[in-house]
C-alpha cells in the first residue's frame, strides 16, 4: 500500500460521512446512489435516493415500471437522461443477465448509461474489485497532489488519471479507497477555497507547496452554453390547465410542460398577441410573470410565463393546437412527470386557481 493510499484510508475511517449506501453491498442500491450523485450534491440527493428506492426497491421493479413512472419518481433531480438510462439498464439486467447486476466492470459497462466511473464505483463497493473510480473529486485530488497539468477533458488525461488511480488503489479495500477520495474531494479538497490546513495529504501535496492548487485540475475547453428563449402560456379554464408532452431529441423529453413559443427573445404581451393572432373575445390575458434564467450544462434558458384565463376550450390559436395540447385537472397533473420549473408553477397554480 502506498503512503497516499494509507493516508487517505486512515483519514476516511475516522471522517467518513454516514451515508446509507455505505452500509450495504447491494449493487442495485449502490448503483442508484452513484447515478443520483453524478449531478447532485449528497445533501440534496439523499431524500431522492430514499424516494426512488421506495418506488423501485429492486431492479425487477424498476425494469417493469413504465417510463412515465420512472420520470415522475426522478422529478426534481434534473438531468432526466439519467432516469431514462437507469430504466433501460434495468431492463437489460433482466433480459441479458438473468435479473442479476453484473459483477465485473466489463459487463457493467454494457449497461445503458454506465460509464467507466460508475462501473468502477459499483465494482469496487459492491464486489470488492480494485478499479479506481475517477470522477471530478479524483481528478482534483490527484492532479493537485501529484501536480499533474494534463487536461482532464482529453483522452490522454483521462487515461493518465485512470492508470494512476489503478496503481494507487488498495487491493484489500478498493471501495474504501474510492470513497475516501470522494469524501476528501467533497469536504476538503474543494474546487475553490480548498481547506488545505485540514487535509491529511497536505505535507506531500505538490500543488499546495507550489502555489498551484487553484489552477488544478486543467481543462482544455470551456463549456459553451446555447441561449434559448422560452415563452410559456399558462392557459387556465375552471380548475384545469393546458399541458403538452415534450418530444424526444431535446431537453426534458417525454415530460410535460405548458404550451411553448420558443423565439429568439422573450416576448412582450403585445408581441405575444401579434404572434398568436388570437381573438380575445372569450379570453383574458391576465399577466406576465417574473422571468427565470435556468442553467443547464450546455444551455442557458431564459423563461417567461404568461397567464391566460379562458372560459371555453375552443378557439385556441393554431400555434398552440399544433403542440397536441390537452387540459388536465389537479389529480391528473399530480401523476405527470414535469420539469422543476413547470412543477413550481403548477404547485402555485392549483391551490388557488383563478376562475
Image: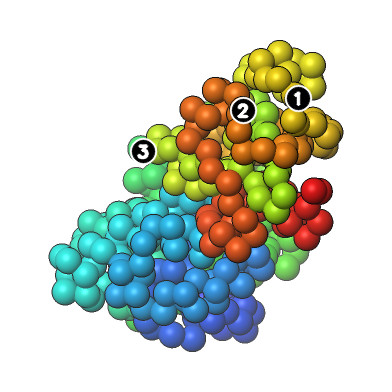
For residue 256, side relative to residue 123 (left or right) = right
Q: CA distance from mark 3 to mark 1?
A: 64 Å
Q: Residues within 10 Å of mark 1 (few under 14, many from 20)?
A: few
Q: Nearer the viewer, residue 143 or 277?
A: 277
Q: Where residue 62 appears, x then y in whole percent?
A: 36, 70
Q: Which residue is mark 3?
A: 156
The residue drawn where x is 66% and y is 68% is 43
Residue mark closest to the camera, 2 vs 3: 2
The residue drawn where x is 81% and y is 48% is 354
Q: CA distance from mark 2 to mark 1?
A: 10 Å
The residue drawn where x is 66% and y is 50% is 240
Is 112 above or below relative to 131? above
Badge 3 marks a residue whose secondary structure is helix
Is 176 above or below relative to 286? below
For residue 239, side relative to residue 105 (left or right) = right
Task: Give the label on residue 231, or none.
Answer: none
State the quadrant of the N terminus. bottom left
In the picture, residue 210 is in which quadrant?
A: top right
Task: Give the label on residue 315, or none.
Answer: 2
Residue mark closest to the camera, 3 vs 1: 1
Q: Residues within 10 Å of mark 2 (few under 14, many from 20)?
A: some
For residue 154, side relative to residue 188 (left or right) = left
Rendering colour mode: rainbow
Q: CA distance from mark 2 to mark 3?
A: 59 Å
Mark sitting earlier along the chain (3/1): 3
Q: Where residue 123 appears, x then y in whole percent?
A: 32, 70
Q: Which residue is mark 1?
A: 281
Q: Where residue 106 appears, x then y in whole percent?
A: 21, 61
Say whether marks 2 and 1 touch (CB < 8 Å): yes
Amino acid at each position: 500500500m502506498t503512503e497516499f493510499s494509507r493516508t487517505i484510508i486512515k483519514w476516511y475511517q475516522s471522517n467518513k460521512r454516514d451515508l446509507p449506501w455505505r452500509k450495504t453491498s447491494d449493487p442495485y442500491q449502490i448503483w442508484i446512489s452513484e447515478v443520483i450523485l453524478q449531478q447532485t450534491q449528497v445533501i440534496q440527493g439523499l431524500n431522492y435516493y430514499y424516494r426512488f428506492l421506495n418506488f423501485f426497491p429492486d431492479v425487477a421493479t424498476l425494469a417493469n415500471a413504465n417510463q412515465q413512472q420512472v420520470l415522475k419518481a426522478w422529478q426534481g433531480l434534473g438531468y432526466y437522461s439519467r432516469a431514462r438510462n437507469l430504466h433501460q439498464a434495468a431492463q437489460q439486467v433482466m433480459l441479458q443477465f438473468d435479473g442479476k447486476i453484473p459483477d465485473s466492470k466489463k459487463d457493467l459497462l454494457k449497461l445503458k448509461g454506465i460509464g467507466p466511473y460508475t462501473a468502477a464505483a459499483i465494482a469496487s463497493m459492491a464486489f470488492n474489485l480494485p478499479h479506481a473510480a475517477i470522477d471530478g473529486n479524483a481528478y482534483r485530488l490527484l492532479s493537485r497532489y501529484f501536480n499533474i497539468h494534463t487536461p482532464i477533458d482529453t483522452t490522454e488525461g483521462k487515461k493518465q488519471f485512470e492508470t494512476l488511480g489503478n496503481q494507487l488503489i488498495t487491493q484489500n479495500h478498493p471501495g474504501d479507497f474510492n470513497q475516501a477520495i470522494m469524501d476528501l474531494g467533497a469536504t476538503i479538497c474543494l474546487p475553490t477555497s480548498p481547506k488545505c490546513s485540514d487535509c491529511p495529504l497536505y505535507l506531500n501535496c505538490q500543488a499546495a507547496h507550489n502555489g498551484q492548487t487553484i489552477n488544478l485540475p486543467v481543462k482544455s475547453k470551456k463549456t459553451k452554453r446555447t441561449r434559448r428563449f422560452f415563452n410559456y402560456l399558462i392557459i387556465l379554464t375552471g380548475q384545469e390547465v393546458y399541458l403538452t408532452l415534450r418530444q424526444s431529441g431535446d431537453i426534458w423529453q417525454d415530460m410535460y410542460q405548458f404550451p411553448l413559443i420558443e423565439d429568439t427573445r422573450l416576448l412582450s404581451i403585445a408581441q405575444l398577441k401579434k404572434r398568436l393572432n388570437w381573438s380575445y373575445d372569450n379570453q383574458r390575458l391576465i399577466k406576465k410573470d417574473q422571468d427565470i434564467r435556468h442553467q443547464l450544462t450546455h444551455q442557458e434558458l431564459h423563461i417567461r410565463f404568461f397567464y391566460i384565463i379562458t372560459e371555453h376550450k375552443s378557439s385556441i390559436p393554431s400555434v398552440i393546437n399544433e403542440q397536441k395540447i390537452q387540459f388536465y385537472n389537479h389529480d391528473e397533473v399530480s401523476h405527470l412527470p414535469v420539469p422543476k420549473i413547470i412543477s413550481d408553477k403548477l404547485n402555485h397554480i392549483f391551490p388557488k386557481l383563478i376562475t
